[in-house]
Amino acid sequence: MSIGLDAARTIIAGVREAGANQGLQPLTVVVLDAGGHVLAVEREDGSSNKRFEIAFGKAHGALSLGRGSRALMARAEQQPFFIASVTAAIGGALVPVPGGVLIRGTDGAVLGAVGVTGDTSDNDEIAAVAGIEQAGLAAQVD
Amino acid sequence: MSIGLDAARTIIAGVREAGANQGLQPLTVVVLDAGGHVLAVEREDGSSNKRFEIAFGKAHGALSLGRGSRALMARAEQQPFFIASVTAAIGGALVPVPGGVLIRGTDGAVLGAVGVTGDTSDNDEIAAVAGIEQAGLAAQVD
Amino acid sequence: MSIGLDAARTIIAGVREAGANQGLQPLTVVVLDAGGHVLAVEREDGSSNKRFEIAFGKAHGALSLGRGSRALMARAEQQPFFIASVTAAIGGALVPVPGGVLIRGTDGAVLGAVGVTGDTSDNDEIAAVAGIEQAGLAAQVD
Amino acid sequence: MSIGLDAARTIIAGVREAGANQGLQPLTVVVLDAGGHVLAVEREDGSSNKRFEIAFGKAHGALSLGRGSRALMARAEQQPFFIASVTAAIGGALVPVPGGVLIRGTDGAVLGAVGVTGDTSDNDEIAAVAGIEQAGLAAQVD
């Protein structure tokens, strides 16, 4: 099972509202379905060119390993060669810093992931969680 | 110059409204800025996994060569080796069938591109044009 | 042996002058040394995004096989699978239509190549030859 | 908005003049538009083969993340895995040492980037800034 486009749009709206309320830098938000495929994206004006690729890499890396991207950062700090090798093995889309958050349903099933980039990684993650919760779903950051 | 996120969202809403009104299959819509970078995406429920990549390839191919993707199809029919070689030269993101449409401003400048996929290529293109025109901009299909 | 930057700049100026005199579309000109490495590039205003990659592919393909890109087009028409396989084998930078022209010295040695794109392939080639001749060197188109 | 070819040529002339005045090693200068696409390149005689790719990577990395490449070096020193992963996510063209400098207009908008390589990274950056300022534009190094 996977979230659909309506939920993805609710999440994006929630992320952007959180960013605006907290005065964050322009954000880029990517929502992926459970299969790791793009459902919806919005890149705010003033973002640099490759923010889609970075947000996608956070969310895609999270789904690839079944952990929020904060956990991937911890692993990168312990075993950088592991994260480097997985990044190559999966084709390059794995960005191991906070801001890639798993979306779980009320029964715990993984329904997709959100990737956010634009401000500090910690703030990106806070906004991602806010968006997921606004859709009535559960967020897993690590 | 390039369109911003608000215009991109208006275009997506217009494309989806056109698809719904005409009973088209689920659509995926990608809007790129003038530099070929993702601004906004929506993939409707029921779409297959890689529809983002296909819609991206239509729009990215159009911006790469400065022609709507219908013109790239005509070139592919005449010189398939040319389109194959350009696809390799630019890294793979060029899908030469209708549905990749350039967005031009009132002064004629290229402001970005829309890529649509999901129904027949001809219908994809009709929906793309409808979305661009709903935003008060001009569409170039070939 | 290879041409140097001064000769490359003379060639680019000559290509652009030929384009302006004949009212061609905006041109992109790439000059490579004998090793196939970039020496100088100019992309005129109004060119689409990936014109550097296309011009590079014409010149790089020519040097890769030791023939002007017009000869590569003839081969692509006869044996498309050969050109497709070479394109993959050399990493993608081979665009087999006219406009990639070898630069030869007075003793016949290959000194580099010019790639031009923006107008029709035939016109691109005419401008490339004009630039090479303006630098007092010999052009090989096939 | 983006700079055009005339401004790009002025910047290259300024970089090379700065290099000559300070007795720097042979320089390669790449100017990209705001979308990260090549506008103009010059590689001085005596440069090694892949200097274009290095200068491109400095400028392209800067535009990808919206920071001068000096800031990317600082991030690489703190979180090498982050820079490694972004490099993979954007397709490889990111060289995180000084010499990739954002070009900003008088209103602060990003208009493109310059990449310089050939001497020490610090000297490459000094020359890049000199070129941008010679064109009456503002340089952002980090």
Image (cartoon, coloured by chain):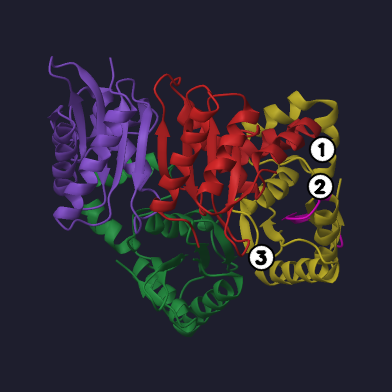
Chain colours: A yellow, B green, C purple, D red
Where residue A40 appears, as percent x and y from the top left, is 63, 63
Mark with earlier residue (2, 3): 3
- Which residues lie in the magenta part? A106-121
Q: Which residue is mark 1?
A: A73
* Chain at tag 3: A
Task: Tell me the residue that label 2 is attached to.
Answer: A98
Give percent across and percent down for residue A93. Answer: 64, 41
Q: CA distance from mark 1 to mark 3?
A: 25 Å
Image mark 1: chain: A
Q: Amino acid at mark 1?
A: Met
Q: Nearer the viewer, mark 1 or mark 3?
A: 3
Q: Is residue C41 left or right of residue D139?
A: left
Q: Which residue is mark 3?
A: A44
Q: Earlier in the sequence, mark 1 or mark 2?
A: 1
The local secondary structure at tag 2 comes to loop
Residue displayed at 32% across by 38% down: C30
For the point 32% across and 43% down, the residue is C54
Which comes sooner in the sequence, label 1 or label 3?
3
Same chain under badges 1 and 2? The reply is yes
Where residue A82 appears, as percent x and y from the top left, is 75, 26
Residues at circles 1 and 2 in contact by the CB criterion of under 8 Å? yes
Residues packed near mark 2 inside 10 Å, few (<14), some (14 to 19) or many (20 plus): many
Residue A124 image point, x, y percent: 80, 55
Could you tell me if residue C117 is visible in this image? yes
Judging depth in this view, the residue of D63 and C83 nearest the camera is: D63
Q: Secondary structure at mark 1?
A: helix
Cα distance in 3D space between marks 1 and 2: 7 Å
Q: Residue at x 18, y 16 (%)?
A: C109
Check the image and report above or below for D12 versus B66.
Answer: above
> Which quadrant, please, contains the C terminus of chain A?
top right
